[in-house]
Image (cartoon, helix red, strand yellow):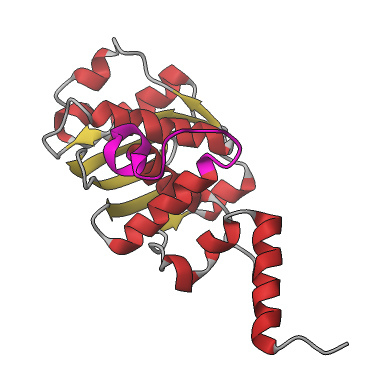
Amino acid sequence: MRAAHPATALLLFLTAAFAGSGCQLVRRLPFLSGEPLPPPQAFKDENLDHGLVHRVLALPLYDESGFSTRSDVVSDSLRDELIRLGRFGVVRPTASDAMLKSADGPHGNGRIPVATMIELGRRYGVDAVLFGAISHYRPYAPPALGLSVSLIDVQTGRILWSVTDFVDGSDQRCAVSMRWYFEDETATEETVFGSELMHTSPRWFARFASQRIVHTLLPPLQTE
């Protein structure tokens, strides 16, 4: 029996791979789909990997973008992604908490005094407080979002985790990452929508941006 021509063998290999993994091969080959965004810039204290933080108070993000009517979508998405990660319990502050609405609270100036941080830790029984700001937000297509978040130890005031990221749907690499994210999220469920939903739905885009932030808490991938 004659051996297959190298080009034919390659075609058969790719066909078999497509049949076994659906669209995964198409999505993961750089020459077919383009390069994705690199991970966000992040700092993580090693204590977070030692299980020393059990409960976190996730405050609403301070809006510096001018789209305050939509900023709650981003805050909710970030909180939901933290819960999905399962690294620690996530506590939501009560809407009537006067301390958070005062001039010295995070809604007043985007910063939290040490005394306020300690009191929040005591009141909600948490080990750390998560707060941050939305520096840029364009909820309409092409969407864009700039975020900076920090996790602060309520006993020492030490920064345990901080991340800064900016994602812009008009950037080709961001568009690739958005498509990959959508395919991963909908891989086990049927939907009539395509990945263009990432550009038209503020909630889907906020989920994408929040997952990028939260996944910097994961241990780095081990390479041989």
At x 39%, y 51%, the residue is 178
Horizontal relation, residue 47 to residue 134: left or right: right
The spot of residue 196 in percent (x, y) is 34, 44
Q: Quadrant of the N terminus?
A: bottom right
Which span of residues is magenta-colored? 185-205
Res. 40 in view: no
At x 15%, y 39%, the residue is 64
Front residue of 56 and 83: 83
Q: Is residue 170 magenta?
A: no
The spot of residue 87 in percent (x, y) is 58, 39
Q: Image height check: is 106 above or below 183?
A: above
Q: Is residue 195 magenta?
A: yes
Front residue of 30 and 207: 30
The spot of residue 58 in percent (x, y) is 40, 30
Residue that extends furthest to the right in the rendered view of this protein = 1
Horizontal relation, residue 177 to residue 69: left or right: right
Residue 195 quadrant: top left
Residue that extends furthest to the left in the rendered view of this protein = 66
